[in-house]
Image: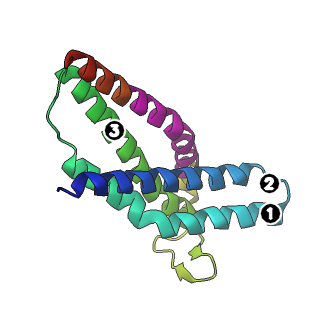
Amino acid sequence: MNAFPIFRFVLLALLVAACAWLFLTGEAIHAQSERAALIAAIWRHVGYGAILTPLLIGAPLTFFWSARGRPGGNAFLHIAALWAMRVVMAAVIVLAVTGPLVVWTHGSDLKVFDWFVIANPIGKREAIHAALESGHGALAEALPWISGLTAAIALFTAMANNTRSR
């Protein structure tokens, strides 16, 4: 029995859970009205993002390397589903990379809860900080919609292929 499909399913489930958690902690930042609560929400989001970064980069790379497959029916639908998944995985990697850059260009070290600190290697860069921060936020807001579209394409492809095989 080949365990790779089970591994991919578990990896995808962990990736979805991690992205959902980071989305929720990111959204919690906007709900804070007091400065102390706002700062705590930001550092909570940063801490979880730093801990989950290996998963956020490693899982999509695994899917990039292994997501080839063979069209079981409509080749166009198969290719569309494959590229939609690649777009989602690329967005996750971009978010994982821009997250620390947003912190560092603000001039801060990356604090992972009270466990450890990753020193700022680039210094304060206000000129690009605003663009990185708004881009990170906009992509994070778009990711659930992109993911939903990807899931719809994949389901449509699976249904179309299943209908053709009858």
Residue at the spot x=76%, y=60% of the render?
38
Disc on the earlier residue, 3 or 1 = 1
Helix, strand or loop for disc 3: helix
Q: Nearer the viewer, residue 100 or 66?
A: 66
Q: Is residue 104 left or right of residue 55?
A: right
Disc on the earlier residue, 1 or 2 = 2
Question: In the rendered image of this protein, does residue 143 appear above or below residue 27?
Answer: above
Stretch in magenta? 131-152
Quadrant where the C terminus sits is top left
Q: Is residue 46 left or right of residue 159?
A: right
Q: Point out residue 45 in the picture as x, y percentages from the top left corner.
A: 62, 62
Question: In the rendered image of this protein, does residue 131 appear above or below residue 99?
Answer: above
Q: Point out residue 29 in the picture as x, y percentages from the top left corner.
A: 71, 54
Which residue is tagged 1? 37
Q: Nearer the viewer, residue 110 or 121?
A: 110
Comparing labels 3 and 2, the label whose residue is closer to the camera: 3
Which residue is tagged 2? 32
The amino acid beneath tag 2 is: Gln
